[in-house]
Image (cartoon, helix red, strand yellow):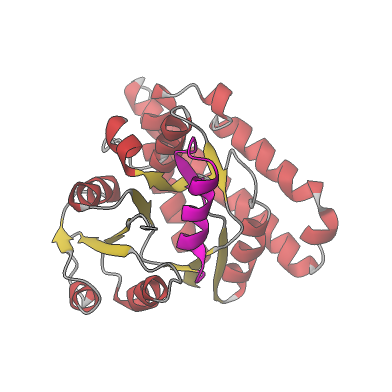
Amino acid sequence: MNQPLVSIIVPTRNSEAVLEACLESIRAQSYPEIELIVVDRNSTDNTKAIAETYTTNVYDREPERSAQRNYGAQKAHGTYVFFIDSDMELDPDVVAACVEKTAEDPALKGIIVPEESFGKGFWAQCKRLERSFYIGVDWIEAARFIDRDTFERIGGYDESLISGEDWDLSQRVAAKGGLGRITELIRHNEGHLHLFRTLRKKSYYAQQFTKYTDRTDTSATNQNPYIIVLKRFGLFFSKPHKLFRNPVLGVGVLFMKVCEFAFGAFGYLAPRKESDGSA
């Protein structure tokens, strides 16, 4: 029986510190029919050289990751496209589980793969604990493994979105046939996580999030930014024994999220004030 080809698309940007581990995890997949595509964005380090040791399908595209992903999908030959970031590593059976899930229910057009964080330092441990609350939560997780015909019919990623693009795509895929879920994990390498760098990133993406909320019925999708704050803290406090099993980490998670939401609120509201002429 022929097995469908899966095209794994990895956008990169100065990713030399994490890329080899990512690509090794793809090479180590138990599923044999995989096409690897790397789409770089003007890296100035050894990212492209590393990528070229794993695949001849290395391309250049800008300006942002949505454009990189779409370009990778244009080059893909697979029945399915699977989008992962360069700081992610796959459990060995992730691709096999995704293909098996779609074979069990051909109506499914996308598969959600849960994510687990790891990294160095206190804040990386906090992020690991935080992300553990999100596994199985539909309004947080998004599909990464997608039927390619469906991806093409809905127009791929919206390249005008820099934040919220994963949710946007996943919602449009779900509307075409529904989403499935596997238990195998993507492991997200947070590296040596620094709180202030994280807060700056949150502020930047929050500024871009207005493009998503302005065009989406966020009350229906649970992605209204104000609802997000309440529901995330609700998730944490729904399992107090888990949150405070290590009290220091539990308090760290809450402090980190308060800071992230504060910086995010500033970033989210700033462009609205400017458009209102009140800045």
Q: Residue furthest right?
A: 241
Q: Is residue 126 visible?
A: yes
Task: Find residue 20 and report its horizontal and vertical position in percent.
Answer: 34, 78
Q: Residue shown at 62%/31% (left/top)?
A: 227
Say whether residue 279 is visible.
Answer: no
Give the image location of residue 56, x and y in percent: 16, 70
Of 249 and 94, the residue lying toward us? 94
Return the residue nearer the eye: 245 or 196.
Answer: 245
Q: Residue at x 34, y 64 (%)?
A: 33
Q: Position of residue 17 (x, y in %)?
A: 34, 77
92 within the magenta span: yes
Residues 46 and 135: in front is 135
Answer with the quarter of the image where residue 245 lies.
bottom right
Q: Is residue 35 magenta?
A: no
Image quadrant containing the N terminus = bottom left
Rendered view: 100 above or below 67: below
Instruction: Reply above or below: 242 against 109.
Output: below
Q: What residue is rendered at 47% in x and 59% in y?
A: 198
Residue 277 vertical position relative to residue 77 in the rendered view, above or below: above
**Residue 135 versus residue 137 in the image, above or below:** below
On the image, which quarter does residue 18 sit in?
bottom left
Across the whole image, how many numbered discs are drawn on residues?
0
Q: Is residue 160 left or right of residue 245?
A: left
Q: Position of residue 215 (x, y in %)?
A: 39, 23
Q: In the rendered view of the protein, which quadrant contains the C terminus?
A: top left
Magenta span covers which residues? 91-112
Relative depth, front residue between 252 and 278: 252
Asked whether, in this view, residue 270 is left or right of residue 262, the answer is: left
Residue at 49% over, 68% down = 190
